[in-house]
Image (cartoon, rainbow, N blue to C red):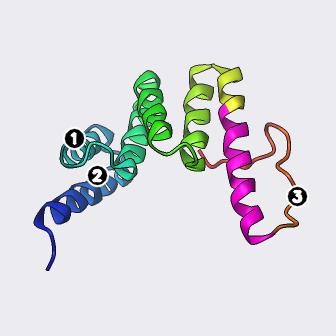
Amino acid sequence: MTDPIEERRQALYMEGLALFGKDQHEDALVKYDEALEIDPDWTEAMHGKAMALMRLERYDDAITVGKRIVELDPNDAFAHTSLSMFYQRKGMIDEAEAEGAKARMISWKEELKKNPDAAPPGPAGSMNVIQ
């Protein structure tokens, strides 16, 4: 049996993704926020919200959401990568580089679990990030 609340949460998130894909970022935020009303600590919806905020150039808000994701899941490499992008766009280069380094280290540690001979992460700027 499916949980109607979970179905609603997931549907709102998917609506947010669809709106984001159509560059309707304000409308996407509404859907992400509705999903987060159901589950305030749902990092997947937070990621969507943060990216929509970035697209709207609301960098301080995006940073706040990104920091919350990291509080909930310190090993979320994508959250650190996103924070790096938000800081970079705000001109906070030192903070951007620090978050990028955290993302690289987390990703390397994950890779080591599968490949014990994985090379360590490269220097700042060596990670390809799609923006």
Residue 30 at what x, y percent from top left? 22, 41
Residue 8 at what x, y percent from top left? 16, 60
Q: Residue at x 41, y 25 (%)?
A: 58
Residue 99 at what x, y percent from top left? 65, 34
In the displayed structure, does residue 94 sit left or right of residue 49?
right
22 and 110: which is toward the camera: 110
| Quadrant of the rendering where the N terminus is positioned | bottom left
Q: Is residue 93 magenta?
A: no
Q: Secondary structure at mark 3?
A: loop
98 and 110: which is toward the camera: 110
Q: Does the magenta stretch mainly form a helix, a strand or a loop?
A: helix
Magenta-colored span: 99-115
Q: Secondary structure at mark 1?
A: helix
- Mark 3 is on which residue type? Ala
For mark 3, does the 10 Å Cα neighbourhood hold few (<14), some (14 to 19), or many (20 or more) residues?
A: few
Asked if the residue under mark 3 is in contact with the one under mark 1, i.e. CB atoms within 8 Å, the reply is: no
- Mark 1 is on which residue type? Val
Q: Residue at x 54, y 31 (%)?
A: 86
In the displayed structure, does residue 93 sit left or right of residue 53?
right
Q: Which residue is mark 1?
A: 30
Q: Earlier in the sequence, mark 2 or mark 3?
A: 2
Q: Which residue is mark 3?
A: 119
Q: Which residue is mark 2?
A: 16
Whole-Å distance between the Cαs marked 2 and 3? 38 Å
Q: Nearer the viewer, mark 2 or mark 3?
A: 3
In the displayed structure, does residue 101 sit left or right of residue 61?
right
- Mark 2 is on which residue type? Gly
Image quadrant assignment for residue 10? bottom left
